[in-house]
Amino acid sequence: MTEERIITPLDEVDIDMEKAANALFLGPQASLIEKIQDFNGRYSRYCTTGDVIQINKNYGFKPCVYDKIKEVYGNYCLGYRSKPIDMWSLKYRIDNNAWNQRTFWRDAISIQRQMRELKDSNVGWQDNVVVVRQFFDELKERIPHEIENALNIFTNDDITIGIQDGSADGSERWANMQIVIELFTADIDMQVFHQEDEIANYRWGNVATQWKIPFWKFVNIDRLCKVY
C-alpha cells in the first residue's frame, strides 16, 4: 500500500502572487486594511452597493464612500430599513439604537484617523505583490541549500520541507498556508553516562518529528508585517 503523501514541495506549489498578497495584512497599511475589512464585514450588509469603505493608495477614500456611510447609518443605526407602524415606534427605534450609533462612529472615525496619520507621516503604500513574490522565490531557492548543509552534519537524518497538501488549493486558503518540516532520524543509540563513564546503551531505533509553521509568518518581518 502506497503511503499517503502529505507534503507538496515548494517548487510544485502554484499560487497567484497578487491574490495571495491581497489576502495578507502586510506593510505599513496592514492594520488599516484589517480595520477596514472588519468594518465592511460588519456593515456592508446594510449597504446596497458592496463594501462600505474603500480607499486608494494615497490613503484617501474612493468615490461614494460618504454616501454609503450615510446609507448604512440610516439602515443600521436609525433602523430606516424597517417600516415603522407609528411615530412612537419610529422614535423608539432611533432612540433604542444609540449604542449602535456610538459604535458605528467610533469604528468609522478610527479608520479615518489612521488614514490621516499615515498620510501626514508620508508613509508610502507598500507593494505587497513584490514583497510576497520575493519572499516565495527566495524561500524556494534557500531551502534545498539549507537541507543539504544540515544533512552534511547529521548524516543519519532525512529532511523534507514543503507545503501541507491541500493548503494551496484555492485562493481562499493561501493566507493560511502552512510550511511543513519533517525530520526522520535513523538508528538512534541512547547512551547514559555517570560522570565520564558510560553506564548504559539503548538501541532507540528511528524517530520521526514534524513541525508546522504558518507559511507567511516571517515574510516582510522588518517592514511591519502582520499576517493572519
Image (tube, rainbow, N blue to C red):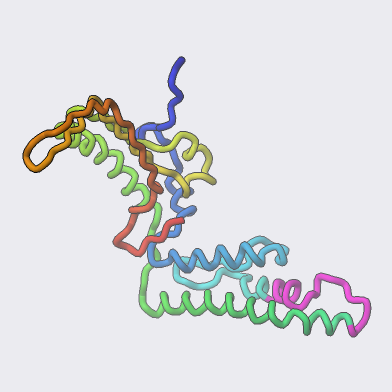
User: Left or right of 136: which side holds 45?
Assistant: right
Observer-nearest of 170 and 97: 97
Residue 88 at what x, y percent from top left?
89, 84
Instruction: Tell me if 150 is positioned left or right of 61 in this view.
Output: left
Residue at x 29%, y 43% (from the top left corner)? 139
- Measured as percent of width and height from the top left, residue 114 is found at 47, 76
Residue at the far left in the pictured view: 196
User: Residues in magenta?
Assistant: 70-88
**Residue 80 within the magenta-colored segment of the rendering:** yes
Which sits in the foreground, 17 or 180? Answer: 180
Name the residue at 37% across, 39% down. 180
Please state the horizontal and vertical placement of residue 166, each as a whole percent of the image. 49, 35
Give above or below for 47 relative to 111.
Answer: above
Residue 195 is a magenta residue: no
- The residue located at (56%, 63%) in the rendering is 37
Vertically, is 3 above or below 128?
Answer: above
In terms of depth relative to the viewer, which is nearer, 111 or 91?
91
Image quarter of residue 182: top left
Foreground residue among 224 and 162 = 162
Residue drawn at x 53%, y 40% as measured from the top left:
170
